[in-house]
Amino acid sequence: MDAHPPLRFEIEGGDSARDGSTALVLLHGRGADRHDLRGVYPALPTGTVLVTPEAPHPGAPWGYGPGWAWYRYVADDRVVPATLTRSLESLDAFLGDLPSTLGFEPARVVLGGFSQGGTTSLAYALTRPGAAAGVVMLSGFLVDAPEAVPVRPGALDGVPVFWGHGTHDPAIPLTLGLRGRTSLGEIGADVTPHDYPMGHQISTRELADLADWLRIRVDGREEA
């Protein structure tokens, strides 16, 4: 049996895409699935294609319910490194095949996600410099696993990071978000922080800010 079977996924906006479009790959949170973030699509800038893959680890054995997980969580900002590494390797294959999957050559691929998905996306960008044109962190954290995910100066050069977080998040406290932002700042990363009066969720205001960031910082378009 293949140790790294292909990730299942959904695509929104692919029918109207063409070479040069931006592909936003969003990873779901713990215990969710590939359908969870499809509703984000209407808020994205015109011409953006949304791709939502499904994590490789079944969540039930770890007590995460019937959905899927990108890694096994320990506590605070710590995870079981081998489980995260497995997901990063699965993303290698998935992103490598993305042009043939989409049927067009995207001008840029932005990687992000919610909660576990955001944490995994940031880990991917740090360990594969230049693999993503931008990182979207929605209520996640910078994992504390120096051997698996080193935070090196220059790793995110030219890769803007959108980091949104709820000020009342009970699952991943804002303090963890602030800790991660500080660490990225120390290596010279370009981080755009946004905090919202909410819990562990994605708000309408956050999606509007994300759309502006994608349009201006990633696509380089001023017009709405």
Image: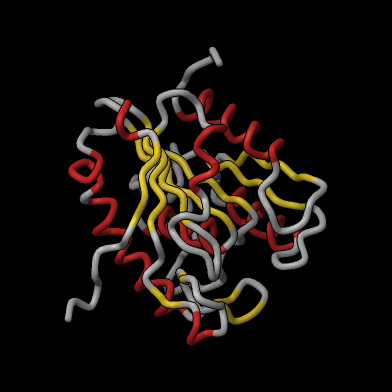
- Of the 4 image quadrants, the one containing the C terminus is top right
Instruction: Tell me what residue is drawn at x 20 percent, y 37 percent.
Output: 103
Q: Is 37 on the left or on the right of 54, as rendered?
A: right
Question: Based on the displayed image, in which of its 4 quarters is residue 83 positioned?
Answer: bottom left
Residue 152 seen from this side: no
Expressed as whole percent of the image width and height from the top left, the position of residue 143 reads 55, 67
Instruction: Tell me what residue is drawn at x 35 percent, y 73 percent.
Output: 86
Can you say whether 111 is above or below 207 in the image? below
Expressed as whole percent of the image width and height from the top left, the position of residue 10 reads 36, 50
Can you say whether 195 is above or below 123 in the image? above
Taking the view exactly as shown, the residue that stands out farthest to the bottom is 61
Residue 147 seen from this side: yes
Instruction: Tell me what residue is drawn at x 55 percent, y 62 percent.
Output: 29
Q: Nearer the viewer, residue 6 or 176?
A: 6
Expressed as whole percent of the image width and height from the top left, the position of residue 180 reads 63, 58
Instruction: Tell me what residue is drawn at x 57 percent, y 55 percent.
Output: 114
